[in-house]
Image: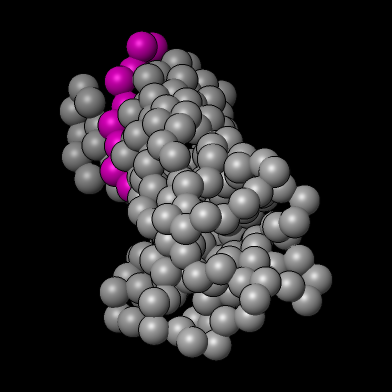
Amino acid sequence: MKKSLIIPVLALSFSQPLFAADNADDGAWQLTVFAGQRTSTTLEDDKDDDDVSIDETVTEVDFLNDTSAGLILGWEYDNNGRYGELLFSHSATEFEFDNDVELDDMDVSVTYLHFGGSVPVSSGKVPIYVSAGIGIAHLAPGDDSLDTETRPSANLGVGARFNFNENFALRLDARGYGTFFDSDGYIFCSGDTCRIRTSSNVWFQADFTAGLTYTF
């Protein structure tokens, strides 16, 4: 339980730029367009759960590694290189199950929308920064028998910027996401039916991305 709280607590501390922005002088804004690769952990099954109806399947849920893409809007809130950030990140991938779950469409999209910020931890020609945020994760299966899931989530990452000039830079990020599920294990319910049950309370994904940042 304590481990599951590490990411949101750190993310909350980085989200302070949201509340400090009104008191800051007019600073630079940044828009980053990025793309990369996303990998995921498994949503574990609950082999000890005997309370399973005939319409439900207790199964591990895997997500294929796939590309991701998104936008980051940042605003400078002090003269120390710290930025508040609004992050949008999206990927389209597919389910994999360890049991014979029959779906007409195995596609699923995973989208994050997070508020947070970035803090520089080293200076020089290649500034290194740590970033974090909190928000929501939206999982949208392509199969009509599965409902969408919108859950609280947080992220924590590290990155570097390679400046081309005053306005453009290459931004590299490695970012981990944690998404929090209910302890009852029901996911992707549709109406009164929950097709899939797992035992995972926290689900992790990681993005490795490269982006072009424009400062204005």
* Magenta segment, prevailing SS (helix, strand or loop): strand
What range of the chain is rendered magenta? Answer: 154-165
* Left or right placement of residue 107 versus residue 99 in this view: right
Q: Residue at x 43, y 61 (%)?
A: 60
Q: Residue at x 73, y 73 (%)?
A: 193
* Left or right placement of residue 147 versus residue 20 in this view: right
What is the basis of the colouring in this image? Answer: one colour
* Left or right placement of residue 138 versus residue 128 in this view: right
State the residue in front, 162 or 140: 140
**For residue 137, which quarter of the picture?**
bottom right
State the residue in front, 15 or 44: 44
Q: Is residue 199 visible?
A: yes
Position of residue 15 relative to residue 84, above or below, is below
Q: Residue at x 20, y 34 (%)?
A: 123
Where is residue 102 drawn, in percent x and y? Answer: 62, 51
- Examine the structure image and report whether residue 63 is included in the region drawn in magenta: no
Position of residue 167 relative to residue 80, above or below, is above
- Examine the structure image and report whether residue 164 is included in the region drawn in magenta: yes
Q: Residue at x 51, y 21 (%)?
A: 214
**For residue 19, which quarter of the picture?**
bottom right
* Left or right placement of residue 140 versus residue 110 in this view: right
Where is residue 37 drawn, in percent x and y? Answer: 40, 31
